[in-house]
Amino acid sequence: MQKVNNVSLYPEERLDDLLTKNMKIIQSEEVFCFSLDAVLLARFVSVPQKKGRIVDLCTGNGVIPLLLSSRTPCLIDSVEIQERLYDMARRNVVLNELEQQITVYHGDVKDALSFLGNGRYDVLTCNPPYMPVVGGEKNKSSHVAIARHEILLTLEEMIRTSSQLVRSGGKVAYVHRAGRLADIIALMRKYRIEPKRLRLVHPRQEAEANMVLIEGIRDGKPDVKVLPPLVVYQDNGQYCDEIYSIYYGEKAEG
């Protein structure tokens, strides 16, 4: 077993560069690797610059809290139900010497109110499972299946919990499939989170949107700002300039 900065890496794990503030992240193809959607959410969400408390649900290996720590000094809590991913997230916090800022909880988002408390947070982020469970073949890896399919957490359960955890006036931000946008907005309003900022993500200029970034305010007034679309790839297959700047942390909205 390899050790880096007194943090153990299992044989199937690798160490990747997060491309911001010299941070590293432990990943494993056997479990789940973060993708562009997590990076986009971490750069899209509005975060306090001085005081405040943030929580990230469905944190996986902890990539969103790590990236948020480069944007704000606020305390960040995170929740992950899968023990293997929780352990990876915890080790990633130690690896980057962020134990004083980031706390990782091993638990079910549906029960988060019991161990995190009601209305404690100023900002909440979540990159949730995207796919409803409707039968047919799911990912063979149970870790990946749980991360991508609503096996342990439905969209409504996630949004209801979000509304309970943030204070009135607190911000909630999600990244999700563009095709679920109507459901997301309907459920946000059902649980008193008013959509305020929305941005559609397109893989290419001529392609339909496949992702949506959305931020709402608990008990906010109706008035949504639709931001310019974000296009990921140029015609030559390379990332667009904005994606490069987002990956390197040079662009942060909000």
Image (spheres, rainbow, N blue to C red):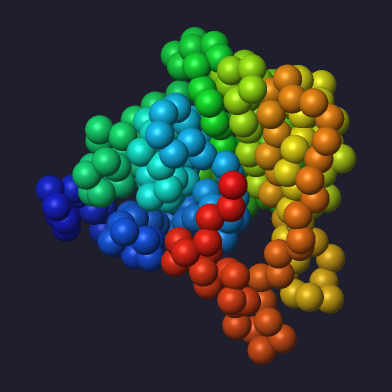
**Residue at the far front in the pictured view:** 50
Residue 194, horizontal then vertical, whole percent = 77, 29
User: How many numbered circles are shown?
Assistant: 0
Up/down of 175 relative to 220, above or below: below
Quarter the N terminus occupies = bottom left
Q: Can you give x and y, in whole percent of width and height, for residue 143 in the image?
A: 51, 44
> Which residue is drawn at the image coordinates 48% and 36% (left, top)?
48
Quarter of the figure with residue 162 = top right
Q: 139 or 96: nearer the eye?
A: 96
- Residue at (41%, 29%) from the top-left corner? 51
Q: Quick check: 182 left or right of 245?
A: right
The x and y percentages for residue 37 are: 60, 55
Residue 108 lies, with reference to residue 85, above or below; the image says above
Residue 98 in view (yes/no): yes
Q: Is residue 113 something that shows in the picture?
A: no
- For the point 84% across and 30% down, which residue is it? 222
Q: Nearer the viewer, residue 135 or 17?
A: 17
> x, y percentage for residue 50?
40, 34
Residue 161 against residue 127 in the figure, above or below = above
